Image (cartoon, rainbow, N blue to C red):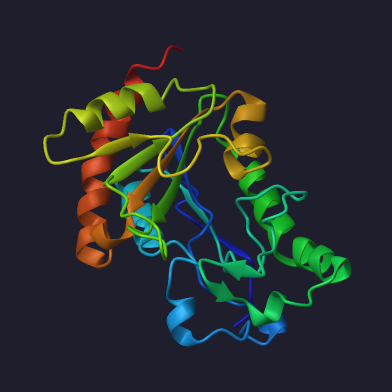
Amino acid sequence: MTYTPYHIEGADRGGRFLVTCDHASNTVPPDLGGTLGLPAEDMCRHIAYDVGALGLARALAASLDSPLIWANFSRLVIDPNRGEDDPTLLMRLYDGSVIPGNRHACAEERGRRLDAYHRPYHRALETLAASRGENVAIVAVHSFTRQLRGRPTRPWHVGILHAWDARLSDPLIARLEAEPDLTVGRNEPYPGHLPGDSIDRHALKHGRVNTLIELRNDLIESEQAQMHWGARLAPLLEAALDEVPE
C-alpha cells in the first residue's frame, strides 16, 4: 500500500464540527525503515501516540455526522501538534525512553520530516477546515496517560484545553462538570495554549470556534469504550455549540 501521512474520513458529512486527531498513530513511515529503534512496548506507550484517541475520534465524528482528519505518523517521528520552531518538535528523550532513531537527527533530517509528514498533514487540515465554511467548530481529540514515570497520579477523567477563545470550551466544561462520575480539568493536564500547535494554527488564527478534549487513556482502551465515550461526548458538544453566539 502507498503510504500517506494523513487520512480524512467522512469528508461529505454535513455536521458543523471538524474532528482532528494529531496523535492518532504510532506508525513509523517506510522511508524511516518502519522503526525508530524503540522496543515494541515503548511504541505501544503514550510516548508514541495517544492511546485510544483515534477510535474515540472516529466514534465522536460519526456521532456528530462530521468529518475527521488524523495524522498517520508517530509523534516521535515529528510531532504534528507542535509548531515548526518548537524545541519539542522532534524528541530525543520522552518520559524516560531514549529514541535511538532521533538521537542523531540533524537539521536536514528535521526539514525532510517536516516536508514529508508534518506539512502535508497541516495543509490537508487547513484545506478541510476552510471547505467547511466560517461556522466550522474544530474539536481536537487527544488522550493522556494516568501517570508519567516518577510523577504523581493525575486525578482527572477528562481535561478540556483552551486558550483565550473559550466560547465552546466554557459551556462544554459546565456540562461535563454536571456529570456526577467525572473529575474534569480545565487546561489539565497541560496548558491550553501552545503557540504554533494545531488549534493555534487552524482555529485561533482564523477565529474558528474550537476546543481540545483530553481523555484519560485507560478509559478508552477498548473499541467498546471508545464508542461509549464518543456517544457520550457528542450530545454535550452539540449542546455546548448551541450556546456559542453566532
35 lies left or right of 63: right
41 lies left or right of 96: left
**Which residue shows up at 88% across the image and 68% down it?**
108
The residue lying furthest to the left in this view is 180
The residue lying furthest to the right in this view is 108
> Which x, y percent locates residue 158?
30, 44
**Which residue shows up at 41% across the image and 44% down it?**
189
Name above or below for residue 161 compared with residue 189. above
The residue lying furthest to the top in this view is 245
> Which x, y percent locates residue 84?
75, 50
Q: Quadrant of residue 212?
A: top left
Q: Quadrant of residue 121?
A: bottom right
**Which residue shows up at 51% across the image and 25% down it?**
135
Name above or below for residue 52 compared with residue 238. below
Front residue of 97 and 60: 97
> Which x, y percent locates residue 184?
28, 37
Q: Quadrant of the N terminus?
A: bottom right
Instruction: Give the mark count.
Output: 0
**Which residue shows up at 50% across the image and 67% down it?**
47
Residue 140 in sight in this render: yes
Residue 15 in sight in this render: no
Front residue of 16 and 86: 86
232 lies left or right of 88: left
Name above or below for residue 225 compared with residue 192. below
